[in-house]
Image (tube, rainbow, N blue to C red):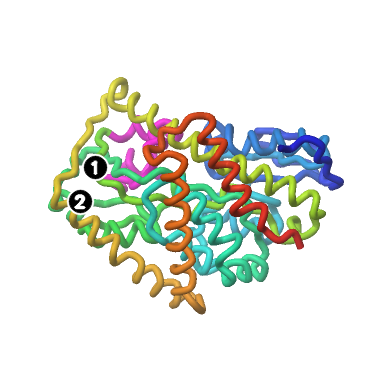
Amino acid sequence: MMAGIRAKSTLATCLALTAATASAGELVYSAFMPATHPDVAKVVGGFAAELAEHSGGAQTLSITAGGALASAASTLDAIVKGSIDAGAIVYNYSPALAPAVTLVGDMPGTIQQVSAAAATETLLLDCAECREEMKRVGFQVVMNHSTESFSLICHGREVARLDDFRGLKVRATGALARLVQSLGGTPVNITFAEVYEGLQRGQIDCTVSGVASLRGMQFWDVADTITTGLPLGTVHGYGLLTVNGDVWADLSAEDKRLWLDLAAEYLARGARQTLSDSHEALRIALSDKGMKEVAANPALRAALDAAFKAQVQAAMASAAERGVEDPQAIADAWFANVEKWSAIYEEIGGDGEWTDAQWAQYAARAKAEIYDKVPLD
């Protein structure tokens, strides 16, 4: 797909997974996750390696991990101000700065592949207010990512019944915080990077998180139970590759096309990596790390279903308070794209246990349905 593409940009340097600040002239990427996290090492790292390869070394990223350049909460501000060129951002860490974009992330989702593609299509094509906001504020989401449906991971607490949720201190932000509160828990607003210490010190009892984080963030060292049969929804408000607006504008159309073609491929690779890591992390957690699997009972699952129905209205009300002009239009675009990508997901293989050929289909559909349609001006 990438053969023959040669970019003309003079943003030259080398790829480096390092904690040191990049030298002048490099495109500097900041990740709040550790360098060993698959999103950094395999997804962004792979994207950067191919970017350098297919541009003949003319376009490269220098990746600094572990929050050394910017924390999870400050990365978007750092991108907008130009102190870094690109980074990984969680939208609901900066809701006042990007309320329309944040609303997309606050919509409910359940299937990783559907959420990743639906959020990307909504942000890049179907949410005019989001596009205007990104341009006005000064950033461009290039590659959106999604977790698998989150689980409840706890230390010292077994959560199987609705009563078990009452008073539970749970790390959750944005829509997930409202979900926790509706179930009777107490949401605690700390960043993802602070969860390990929060569980260790008792600041929180539980976190809503992807199972892959048990391994990627070593949560299995400080957690002992995981509640299954309680899908808490995807976190898809995650701009894994977000770029400073001026940097993006200064790229030629050919440069942008290279980035977008790679983004389509790595949207699929990121989804595959997450799901693979989740399956393996759960196996290790239960077999080798001594964690206990707790099954949610029907009453807790029913309460969760009711909470999801209320989530959309609460998210739109919050967005309106932050100045979003038409929250309903954004919600409508989201649900239309969820319906579209749910059909594509079923067409490719509804069990989600995909072969190499099926993942290639997904990447090709992401390119054709989303990235080929992104304006290059």
Q: What stretch is highlighted in magenta?
A: 195-223
Q: Is residue 77 above or below residue 240?
A: below
Which amino acid does the dot numbered 2 rest on? Arg
Disc 2 on helix, strand or loop? helix
Residue 49, percent from left and from top: 70, 33
Q: In this view, does 16 lie above or below 242?
A: above
Q: Tell me if residue 67 can be seen.
A: no
Q: Residue at x 57, y 34 (%)?
A: 35
**The C terminus lies in quadrant:** bottom right
Earlier sequence position, callout 2 versus callout 1: 1
Between residues 107 and 339, which one lies in front from this camera angle? 339
Q: Residue at x 84, y 47 (%)?
A: 9
Residue 18, percent from left and from top: 66, 34
Residue at the far front: name it: 347
Q: Which residue is drawn at 63% across and 35% down?
A: 45
Q: Tell me if residue 308 can be seen.
A: yes
Callout 1: 10 Å neighbours few (<14), some, many (20+)? some
Residue 50, percent from left and from top: 71, 35
Which amino acid does the dot numbered 1 rest on? Gly
- Residue 229 tag number: 1
Q: Residue at x 25, y 35 (%)?
A: 225
**The N terminus lies in quadrant:** top right
Q: Mark 2 points at which residue?
A: 301
